[in-house]
Image (cartoon, grey):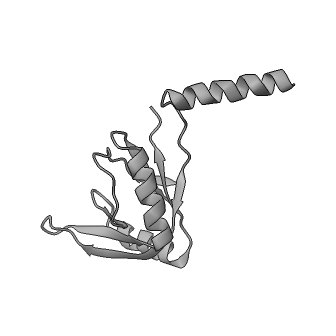
């Protein structure tokens, strides 16, 4: 058994050294979720303001994953999959796009009530 452990530990170190480490999903702590007007005419967006802890977790996650596509999920459903071109350090996330009428408002209510987790993960290839 010790030999197997050493083999697994050695393989993990090689993968990490080669940049193939597996990222873990991060759950973000949200201080405020609300629907706001999007600059696009007639559109709305979901604004998520992260807590200090959520801001730090998101900044760390985005810094480590620049150049990758990530999945942002709310309540277990992917709502957007942007490609990170730079770290996001400000603790504010805007979600816009094609959503059913009232869907963003329902998501904001679920997040605010604690009924839906907001997570980010590196998109599986």
Relative to 83, say whether 31 is above or below: below
Residue depicted at 53% across the width and 55% down the height: 26
Horizontal and vertical percent position of residue 29: 51, 69
Relative to 1, say whether 90 is above or below: below
103 left or right, relative to 75: left
Residue depicted at 28% across the width and 67% down the height: 45
Residue depicted at 50% across the width and 69% down the height: 53
Q: In which quarter of the image is residue 79?
A: bottom left
Compare residues 11 and 49 and report the one nearer the observer. 11
Compare residues 36 and 100 and report the one nearer the observer. 36
106 left or right, relative to 75: left
Horizontal and vertical percent position of residue 114: 56, 74
Residue 75 showing in the rendered view: no
Relative to 11, say whether 112 is above or below: below
Horizontal and vertical percent position of residue 62: 39, 51
Q: In which quarter of the image is the N terminus?
A: top right
Q: Quadrant of the C terminus?
A: top left
Residue placed farthest to the left in the image?
41
Residue 112 showing in the rendered view: yes
93 left or right, relative to 8: left
Compare residues 88 and 110 and report the one nearer the observer. 88
Horizontal and vertical percent position of residue 96: 28, 61
Total marks placed: 0
Q: In which quarter of the image is residue 36?
A: bottom left
Q: Quadrant of residue 99?
A: bottom left
């Amino acid at each position: 058994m010790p030999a197997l452990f050493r083999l697994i530990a050695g393989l993990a170190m090689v993968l990490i050294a080669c940049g193939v480490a597996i990222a873990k999903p991060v759950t973000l702590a949200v201080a405020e979720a609300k629907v706001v007007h999007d600059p696009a005419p007639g559109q709305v967006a979901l604004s998520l303001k992260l807590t200090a802890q959520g801001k730090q977790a998101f900044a760390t996650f985005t810094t480590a994953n620049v150049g990758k596509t990530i999945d942002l999920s709310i309540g277990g459903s992917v709502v957007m999959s942007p490609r990170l071109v730079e770290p996001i350090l400000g603790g504010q996330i805007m979600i816009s796009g094609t959503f059913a009428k009232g869907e963003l408002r329902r998501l904001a209510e679920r997040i605010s009530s604690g009924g839906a987790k907001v997570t980010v993960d590196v998109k599986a290839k």
